[in-house]
Image: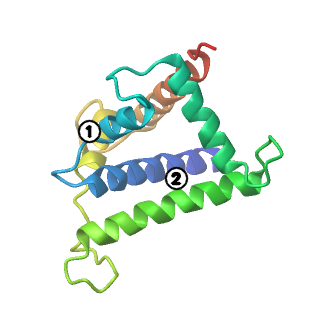
Amino acid sequence: MKHTGFIATIIVGAVSLTAFAAAAQGPGAKPYHEMSFQTLDADGNGEITREEMNTHHQARFSETDANGDGALSRAEMIEASVKRAGARADEMIEQFDANLDGLLTQDEMPKQRRSDKMFDRVDKDGNGSISQAEFDQAQTKMKGHKNKKQHSGKN
């Protein structure tokens, strides 16, 4: 049971972070994948080559490898994650802080539409709640997607 509670917490957290990240882009912003495409398309020719992708990954690794030893420690990975989260928080405050007090109240926070969509996808029978079977099915599906991503890369 402890394991199920932990996984539920992870799923809720992932859904929330996804919703906040999507909302932080705002209605007029380009979708995240377009911004990533432009970043990866280093020569700006409208196509991403394997070399450009590898160069991006190497640069991201080097940026995270604070001591330059060619290996990422737990501390380096946490520090990089905290920096990215801080930058996202700054962007959200800048975009949604209606009264310019440097804080986001519940009323200023973006709506959780994406979270609702995720819930609806997991709630297969549409009864407004997620059963253990629906939860397990969603978890299995997410694990399958993760494994496909890990094993589909070509060197």
Q: Amino acid at mark 2?
A: Thr
Position of 142 with respect to 128 (left or right) is right
Mark before the other along the chain sequence, 1 or 2: 2
Q: Is residue 147 above or below residue 118?
A: above
Q: Is residue 103 above or below residue 30?
A: below
- Residue at figure coordinates x 62%, y 55% from the top left: 80
Q: Amino acid at mark 1?
A: Asp
Camera-nearest residue between 45 and 30: 45
Position of 33 with respect to 27 (left or right) is right
Location of residue 129 (image quadrant): top left
Q: How many marks?
A: 2
Camera-nearest residue between 113 and 47: 47
Element at label 2: helix
Q: Please tell me the numbered disc located at residue 120.
A: 1
**Residue where numbered disc 2 is placed:** 9
Q: Position of residue 59 (x, y in %)?
A: 61, 39
- Residue at figure coordinates x 75%, y 52% from the top left: 74
- Residue at figure coordinates x 44%, y 31% from the top left: 42
Q: Position of residue 90 (x, y in %)?
A: 40, 68
Position of 64 with respect to 133 (left or right) is right
Element at label 1: helix
- Residue at figure coordinates x 36%, y 41% from the top left: 130
Q: Position of residue 95 (x, y in %)?
A: 25, 67
Q: Position of residue 60 (x, y in %)?
A: 60, 42
Q: Residues within 10 Å of mark 2 (few under 14, many from 20)?
A: few
